[in-house]
Image (cartoon, helix red, strand yellow):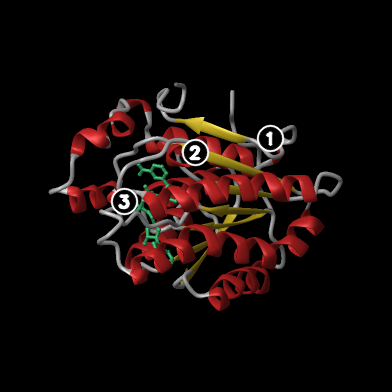
Amino acid sequence: MMVPSDMTGKVALVTGAAAGLGQATAIRLAEVGADVALVDIAEARLEETAQAIRAMGRKALVLPLDLASRDNCRAAVERTVAEFGRLDALCNIAGVMLPGRTTEITDAEWDLTMAVNLEAPFFTIRAAIPHLLEARGAVVNVTSCAAFKGQAYFAAYCATKSGLTNMTKALAMEYSHAPIRFNAVAPGGMMTALTQGMSRLADCDMSLIMRIGSARPELCAIEDVAECVAFLATDAARGYHGACINIDAGVTAG
Ligand SMILES: NC(=O)c1ccc[n+]([C@@H]2O[C@H](COP(=O)([O-])OP(=O)(O)OC[C@H]3O[C@@H](n4cnc5c(N)ncnc54)[C@H](O)[C@@H]3O)[C@@H](O)[C@H]2O)c1
């Protein structure tokens, strides 16, 4: 079973921690003992996550930051280490999904998708590497089943998730002999605020996308995916390096 190991005395940094999978992962890591730095652009909801963690007797550091800024990616790591003195796990979960016809997606929407989904993990990881090496820690990147299947109207999103998946593997190779692990989790459709972005497709040809969107959502429970992310972030996953675990009810199977 993929059960996260004890994180007592250890520190995790979780992005996207205000909602959905990021919130569930932050809470799960706190349940197994971690103090957690919480990063998200949505400050009010971030406080709710922090309160849940503090109610367990763990420490929570609220970092309301826009990860589309590279400076903020670096600041998230620096402020975490300044507060807690160490960093054992980095979970890159924040993401945006702005689907639409390729001829109608704006430059700003393309840029935001690249910045949050692909560039932010890179710049956060780069800042975190020295601390994770010191702590013999781990990185978990959340990608998507859209990394493996071409999905109509999702060109930007698919590009970022494929990029993040293979970036994870490249980092795993670069650090094959070092005390740090890099892994990814690729979920299928989970019922979160992110999937409400699908409403942007109201006048699109849904028959083109239902092929990938027709997974059984009850098999992609947020808690199940969070359990896997938390597992990979802990020493229990010591044998995992460069892996991408698909939790998508078979969407990418064929
Ligand atoms: N929901 C799904 O069906 C699904 C499927 C596959 C992969 N994913 C991935 O899972 C991850 C979590 O998504 P979710 O479903 O929990 O969605 P969500 O919308 O509930 O959570 C995403 C979080 O990212 C935060 N965020 C967005 N832009 C940000 C920015 N610029 N700076 C800081 N934080 C920012 C949001 O405020 C939000 O709290 C994403 O990377 C997403 O691509 C989701």
Residue 31 place in picture, x, y as percent: 52, 44
The mark lying in front, picked from 1 and 3, is 3
Q: Which circle's residue, 2 or 1, is located before the other in the chain? A: 2
> Which structural element holds mark 2?
strand
Q: Which residue lies furthest to the front in this view?
A: 103
For residue 237, the mark is 1
The amino acid type, in three-letter code, at marker 1 is Ala
Task: Determine which quarter of the picture holds residue 122.
Answer: bottom right
In the rendered image, the quadrant that contains the C terminus is top left
For residue 180, the mark is none
The amino acid type, in three-letter code, at marker 3 is Leu
Q: Give the side of residue 54 with respect to residue 232, left or right.
A: left
Q: Is residue 4 above or below residue 74?
A: above
The amino acid type, in three-letter code, at marker 2 is Ala
- Residue hosting label 3: 194
Q: How crowded is mark 3: few (under 14 residues within 10 Å), some or many (20 or more)?
A: some
Residue 24 place in picture, x, y as percent: 43, 46
> Which structural element holds mark 1?
helix
Residue at the spot 52% in from the left edge and 46% down from the top edge: 162
Question: How far apart, in angstroms, are the residues tagged by discs 2 and 3?
Answer: 15 Å
Question: How far apart, in angstroms, are the residues tagged by discs 1 and 3?
Answer: 28 Å
- Residue hosting label 2: 186
Kindly tell me whether mark 2's CB lies below 8 Å from ligand 1.
Answer: yes
Q: Give the side of residue 251 with respect to residue 75, left or right.
A: left
Kindly tell me whether mark 3's CB lies below 8 Å from ligand 1.
Answer: yes
Q: Which residue lies furthest to the bottom in this view?
A: 71
